[in-house]
Image: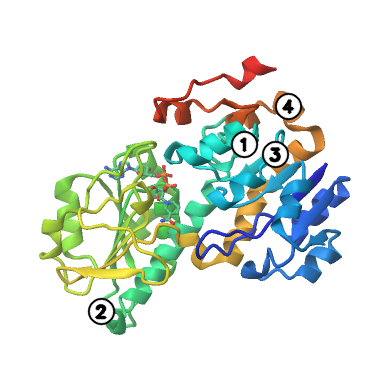
Amino acid sequence: MKVGCVKEIKNNEFRVGMTPDNVKSYVNAGHEVLIEKGAGVGSGFMDAEYEAAGAKMIDTAKEVWDTVDMMIKVKEPLPEEYPLFHEGLILYTYLHLAADKPQTDALLNAKVKGVAYETLIERNGSIPLLAPMSQIAGRLSIQEGAKYLEKTFGGEGVLLAGVPGTPKANIVILGGGSVGTNACKIAVGMGANVTIMDINLQRLAYLDDIFGARIQTLVSTDANIEKAVKEADLVIGSVLIPGKAAPKLFKKKYLKEMKPGAVFVDVAVDQGGCGETTKVTYHDDPIYEVDGIVHYCVGNMPGAVPRTSTIALTNATLSYGLQIANKGLEKACSDNDVIYSAINTYDGKLTCKNVADSFDCYDYTDIKSLW
Ligand SMILES: NC(=O)c1ccc[n+]([C@@H]2O[C@H](COP(=O)([O-])OP(=O)(O)OC[C@H]3O[C@@H](n4cnc5c(N)ncnc54)[C@H](O)[C@@H]3O)[C@@H](O)[C@H]2O)c1
């Protein structure tokens, strides 16, 4: 198969769909790999490294799109890229179609086989191509919180770990899933006092098992949240109710009761945020202040660390990508039916039920009925 990768063109997106090591794996499996020149530079991967791994470096994105059977990307294609689609192309990337009718139409009209990272669901219910980004955002949330607690950024001027003879910072984590657990790991490692809340008691029992006496677990109720945030230096928002807007757990009325200069990092901002005062921010201007509380609400946190994010993402995408390239999409699905769940568009049909349900205008087609 001819497999390709182009430079991401979304604003401030520095990740790339394939690393030089990935190229080696595809080449060793007998595939021809075409990479647009400069595609990996934002993640620190130079053209010479791709060439040494066996890739053919191509001057323009158009040439890569026109030539390949399978395109491996990170972000959903932007409108400038729609005219580059061709019938039968396998597009392996994040698609996020439920909120993007123009892209859905473009993929259907061009009869692209759209394979979305975010809908690939393993047999145990996990979403392996989404999880690495939650891990990164969770770990980064403490790092960003620590930074914005510094006085120069309007923060309280508190060091998370403190030093002997001073109080440690109090961190409250709302939601103990992937993001929350990873935030907890870094917060505990830095020596802060950590309280983590969830509505899922089994999840709290798991967190209690792995972190033991180093953390406080609490059931997430309005009363517990209000009490905890009054003493907090850093609050992390990391709740998720799949497919729904995040519940507004962190209320505006709490802000005035909190320590001036405390920081709220709302990682759940991509689902609308779990704070009443949350609004989306970007890496070039990530914070704002409401009632003395510093808010950090960046919707694509992993973009701050593109090298780690690219390696983490491609660690997860490589094995499914190789199955698809080696066998063709259809055979890869029949050998490993998990891959069916990732197919959003096929031969002009919309094959992801959740995406179809998000619109009134499309019929859903079960992908298994097509073969
Ligand atoms: N901003 C970013 O860059 C970025 C990056 C990755 C993930 N995210 C977002 O972070 C959020 C969390 O993702 P995740 O992977 O940890 O999800 P997850 O499903 O692993 O965890 C969510 C947790 O929230 C808990 N929860 C639900 N309702 C709650 C409530 N009322 N109170 C307390 N806990 C509650 C659930 O029980 C679950 O344990 C999602 O919105 C995700 O899209 C954002």
Please tell me which of labels 1 and 4 falls first in the chain. 1
Please tell me which of labels 1 and 2 falls first in the chain. 1
Q: Secondary structure at mark 1?
A: strand
Label 2, on which residue?
Answer: 154
Say what amino acid the circle numbered 4 marks: Glu
Which mark's residue is nearer the viewer, 1 or 3?
Answer: 3
Say what amino acid the circle numbered 1 marks: Gly
Rendering coords of residue 258 (x, y %): 15, 66
Up the image or down, 358 lies above or below 50; here it is above
| Residue at x-position 24% and y-position 78% | 156
Label 1, on which residue?
Answer: 114
Which mark's residue is nearer the viewer, 4 or 2?
Answer: 4
Label 3, on which residue?
Answer: 86
Which quadrant of the view contains residue 59?
bottom right
Rendering coords of residue 220 (x, y %): 24, 45
Rendering coords of residue 214 (x, y %): 37, 60
Which mark's residue is nearer the viewer, 1 or 2?
Answer: 1
Q: Which mark is residue 330?
A: 4
How has the structure been colored for display?
rainbow
Say what amino acid the circle numbered 3 marks: His
Up the image or down, 252 lies above or below 100; here it is below
Density class for disc 4 (Cα within 10 Å; few <14, some 14-19, many ≥20) is some
> Distance between the Cα atoms at labels 1 and 2?
45 Å
Q: Is 58 displayed left or right of 86 in the figure?
A: right
Say what amino acid the circle numbered 2 marks: Gly
Q: Is 74 displayed left or right of 225 in the figure?
A: right
Density class for disc 2 (Cα within 10 Å; few <14, some 14-19, many ≥20) is some
